[in-house]
Amino acid sequence: MFLRHRSAKSVKSSASSLLSRLTPRRRSKVARAANYAVETLENRCLLTSITLHGGDNFTFINEDGNFQSVKAFGNITAQVIGAK
């Protein structure tokens, strides 16, 4: 069995050609139906969680492009959470 790869460009062009063949009235009906059926998602961000125990070091690059270190001392367990 052979699978044919379709690029995003070819898929987009076929979808846009379908919409271009619709009359303006039909296009607005399709748009209203899509707005009703498709839920808009909230903005997403990437969360990272690191667990540190006493004696662990964690170094990362902060939003300014500088290196930053987190060091855990003593009898401790800490969780560092970052978001982008």
Image (tube, grey):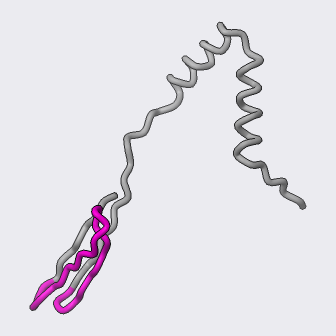
**Quadrant occupied by the C terminus:** bottom left
Picture coordinates of residue 7, whole percent (x, y): 74, 49
Res 30 → quadrant: top right
Residue 68 lies left or right of residue 15; in this view the side is left
Residue 78 lies left or right of residue 5; in this view the side is left
Picture coordinates of residue 77, whole percent (x, y): 17, 82
Count of labels shown? 0
Between 58 and 22, the residue placed more toward the observer is: 58
Q: Magenta segment: does it hold 75?
A: yes
Q: Which residue lies furthest to the left in this view?
A: 74
Between 38 and 6, the residue placed more toward the observer is: 6
Q: Residue at x 65, y 15 (%)?
A: 27
Picture coordinates of residue 24, whole percent (x, y): 67, 9
First to last magenta residue range? 53-76
Work out whether 9 lies above or below 17: below
Q: Magenta segment: does it hold 66?
A: yes
Work out whether 60 lies above or below 6: below
**Quadrant occupied by the N terminus:** bottom right
Q: Residue at x 52, y 31 (%)?
A: 38
Picture coordinates of residue 53, whole percent (x, y): 20, 86
Between 8 and 34, the residue placed more toward the observer is: 8
Work out whether 44 lies above or below 14: below
Res 33 → quadrant: top right
